[in-house]
Image: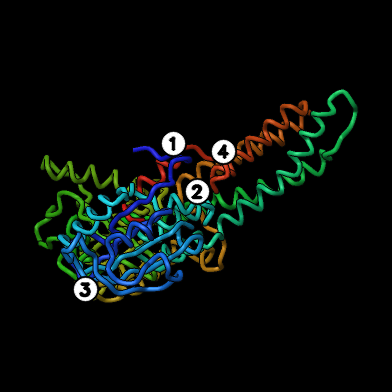
Amino acid sequence: MSFSLHEHSDTIVALATPQGVGAIAVIRLSGKEALRLTNKVFKGKDLEKQDSHTIHFGTIRDGDKIIDEVLVSLFVAPKSFTKENVVEISTHGSSYIVNQVIKLLIRNGARPAKPGEFTQRAFLNGQFDLAQAEAVADLIHSDSETSHQAAMHQMRGGFSGEIQKLRAELIHFASMIELELDFGEEDVEFASRDDLRILVEKLLRAVELLIGSFDLGNVIKNGVPTVIAGKPNAGKSTLLNALLNEEKAIVSEIAGTTRDFIEDEINIGGVIFRFIDTAGLRETTDIIESIGVSRTHEKMKTASLILYLFDLTDTDLSEIETDIAKLEDLGVPFVKVANKMDKGNPNLISTLKTNYPDTIFISAGQKENLEALKDRVLELVNLDKFRTGNTIVTNIRHYDSLMKTRDSLLDILQGLEIQITNDFLAMDIRRSLHFLGEITGEITTDDLLENIFRKFCIGK
C-alpha cells in the first residue's frame, strides 16, 4: 500500500461503522463524483440538486432490484470532513446489505478506501494539520476521560498551535540569516546574534517542557503498567480480583499458585491502570515457578509503578525493610501496601505507621480501604499538569521530532558561542525548522504519510 500526495482525485468508499450485524451501518463516500455515483443507484430525490447538510430517504437499487431503504446524508464540498463531496448512506446493519451496496458503488465507479484515507484527504486538503489528523485516531481509540481530553485538545489544534508559534518565531531569524548570505561580500548584519541567542534559549525552554510532558502523555494514552509484587500468599491475586471486582486470578492458600503474570485494565479517576499480578517473590527449586519469579523481576524493572504488597500476619519488620531497600535501588516508584489489616499484629502496624507513614493499610479479602489505595496510585501519576490545560505530548513521533529539534537548537547555541559562519548557522536553523515542521506536516513525505495513516481503520 502506498499513499501519494498527488493521486487522491478519485472517489473512495468504505464502511464507516464497525463490521458486524447491528441496527444500522453507515457507508461513506468521498470525492468529486460522490454525489453523482450515489445518485445513479439511489431512488428518491435528485441528490445533485440538494443542499449540503441535508438527509434524504429513498432506496438503493441495483437495476430494478431494491437492496435496502436508506437515509442519505449530503456534505457538499468544501463543507465536509475531507473538504470534498461526501455522502454517508445509512443502511440496515446486515453485512449482506452492506456488501451489496459497496459492491454496487464500486461497479459504478468508486474504489475501496485505504486505511485512514478519509482523514488523509482531510489533511491534504487543508482541513487540519498532521498532528491534528493523528489526534483523530487517538480520539477513536481513547478509552478514558484523560486520553479523550488529550486527543480532543490536540485535534482542536492546541498542540499544533504551540509548535506553529515556535516555528514562526524562528522563521524570521532564518530569513534574516539567509539575507545576510545574499550579501556575503558586504559586512552587514540583519539578524542580531544576541537576539537570536535569546530567542533560541526561549525556544529551547519551551521544547524541553514539551519533551518533559511525554512521560505523562504516554501514561494518559497507553495506561500505567502497575506491577503487584510481594511474597507468595501476600494476597496479590486477591487484591487484583478486588480491584477488578471479578474473579480474574486464581486464589489459593497454596504458595506459588501464580506461575505467570495476569494482566487487566482498571479505570481509576479517568486514568487507565494496567495492573499485573505476578508470581510471588521467593527462592524456589520449582523450575516453572522460578521462571515466573524471573519474569516478575523483569516486569518490575519496566513498570511505571509497583504495588509492594506484604501480609501483616506473615511478615516481620526486617523483611519489610529489606524489601523496601531493594525497591528503592530499583528506581521505580512504588507504594507500600500492608494487607490483612483486620488480622495484623497491632505492634507491627503501629511501628509501620511511625517508620513508614505513607504505607497504605488494606484488607484485600474484605475489600477494605481500597479507595485510599486508588487515591495514592492516582496521586503518583500527577495529573495536575494535565488538568491545568498545559499541552501534553502523547505521540512518540512528536517526541522524536522534539528531541531532534532540541539537538538542533543546542547546535545553534554552540555555533553562536564559537562564532561559526552564517552558512553553517543557517543550516542549523533550517534543521530546527525542519523537525518542527515534521510534527504538523509542513515538512512531510509519502513514506511518512503511509506510516501514519495505515494505522487508521478503514472508513476513517
Q: CA distance from mark 1 to mark 3?
A: 62 Å
Q: Earlier in the sequence, mark 2 or mark 4?
A: 2
Amino acid type at mark 1? Asp
Closer to viewer: mark 1 or mark 4: 1
Crowd class of label 3 (few under 14; some 14 to 19; many from 20; radius 10 Å): few
Picture mark count: 4
Residue 358 point in image, percent of width and height: 41, 66
Left or right of residue 55: residue 108: left
Task: Give the secondary structure at mark 1.
Answer: helix
Closer to viewer: mark 3 or mark 4: 4
Say which residue label 2 marks: 124
Q: Earlier in the sequence, mark 3 or mark 4?
A: 3
Task: Identify the mark at residue 343; answer none if there is no mark.
Answer: 3
Specify whether residue 88 is in view: yes
Task: Give the secondary structure at mark 2.
Answer: helix
Residue nearer the viewer, 347 or 16: 16
Q: Earlier in the sequence, mark 1 or mark 4?
A: 4
Q: CA distance from mark 1 to mark 4?
A: 19 Å
Asked whether disc 3 touches disc 4, contact meaning CB atoms under 8 Å apart, the reply is no
Specify whether residue 338 is in view: no
Q: CA distance from mark 3 to mark 4?
A: 55 Å
Q: CA distance from mark 1 to mark 2?
A: 14 Å
Which residue is drawn at the image coordinates 13% and 52% (left, top)?
A: 256
Say which residue label 4 marks: 404
Residue 355 point in image, percent of width and height: 41, 64
Q: Earlier in the sequence, mark 1 or mark 2?
A: 2
Say which residue label 1 marks: 447
Which residue is drawn at the image coordinates 36% and 54% (left, top)?
A: 324
Closer to viewer: mark 3 or mark 2: 2
Task: Identify the mark at residue 301; answer none if there is no mark.
Answer: none
Amino acid type at mark 4? Lys
Crowd class of label 4 (few under 14; some 14 to 19; many from 20; radius 10 Å): some
